[in-house]
Image (cartoon, rainbow, N blue to C red):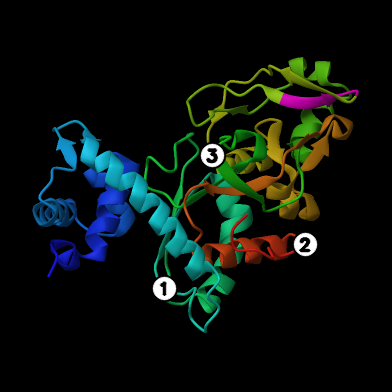
Amino acid sequence: MAKNDRIDFADLKSFLTIVRCGSFRLAAIEMGQTPSAISHAMRRLEARLGAKLLNRTSRAVSTTAAGRDLAARLEDGFNLIGSALETFDAPGAGRLGEIRLNVFADAADLLIAPALPEFARLCPEVRLTVVVENRPIDIVAEGYDAGIRYGHYVPENMVAVPLTGPQRWVMAASPGYLERHGTPREPNDLANHTCLQLLLGDNSSYRWEINDAGEKRRIRVPGLLTINDTATTIAACKAGLGIAYLLEARIASELKRGEVRVVLASNAFVEDPLHMYYGSRRYNHPALVTLINIIRGQHALPKLTRKRT
């Protein structure tokens, strides 16, 4: 019996995941295993092949020449296997496995939370992990299957699927605040108001983007209160602490109840749609397509007709 006949398919998958993630720890997270189990799989694979595939140090992992050649061949093979599985429509075919998503807070609230009940019903055996954070990351390097960002923030080497239509950013304040301080009539009036500052995921202060006679304009606004969380910003806005810059969809309920009001409506800024994105050389788990279609359906977009875009 050839030594290749004794090689475990899972060990090959572990090797490819380590190469892509550049880390035993991240590969273990993605595969739902311990780092020691991943390390043992690699020792077993190298022993059965009789070749060193990875150079390991306490800080980094790199491939040997043999490892690079094997990884390239395996990548093509796993892509073919993935494509075959995507088109397999037998009952339950898309239910197994795990999906790891990285999304920013507004997307979690607007897109993921409303989709979870239907997703759990259609894919009851899928382990779904949703990590909510606002910092920009490399989803492939950090072991995620997909992420959600605005279209212009999606890296060029990724496949991106729109989940919504364009999103509108508005300036809003509570009725109490407007009674005390007046309503701004033009953007320059904001200089005389208290504004709730936004802190981005990279810890930089956000300059509000507004529509100025059809042109995009970034403005700095005054205010001593800086917040990096939308829910807290909405609460501060409702409490009359200042004018907030928010996704209109995030305050739909508050607007309907009259707890906040949009100001400078003609200066609202229309942003790109929110997109689900993933590595172009990685196949989609069928359950990820299911999740995408649930979200698109909730936002009146047609379902995907192909499982790979």
Residue type highlighted by circle 1: Leu
Mark pair 2, 3: CA separation: 27 Å
- In terms of image quadrants, where is residue 262? top right
Span shown in magenta: 209-213
Q: Which mark is residue 229?
A: 3
Mark pair 1, 3: CA separation: 34 Å
Callout 2 secondary element: loop
> Which residue is nearer to you in this view: 267 or 178?
267
Q: Nearer the viewer, mark 2 or mark 1?
A: 1
Q: Nearer the viewer, mark 2 or mark 3?
A: 2
Residue type highlighted by circle 3: Asp
Q: How many marks?
A: 3
> Which residue is nearer to you in this view: 8 or 257?
8
Q: Residue at x 45, y 36 (%)?
A: 137
Q: Residue at x 16, y 52 (%)?
A: 42
Location of the N terminus (image quadrant): bottom left
**Magenta stretch: dominant secondary structure:** strand
Q: Which residue is mark 1?
A: 96
**Residue count near mark 3 (Cα–Cα under 10 Å), binned few <14, some 14–19, many ≥20:** some
Q: Is residue 200 magenta?
A: no
**Residue count near mark 1 (Cα–Cα under 10 Å), binned few <14, some 14–19, many ≥20:** some
Q: Which mark is residue 300?
A: 2
Location of the C terminus (image quadrant): bottom right
- In terms of image quadrants, where is residue 243? top right
- 151 over 251 or under it: above or below: above
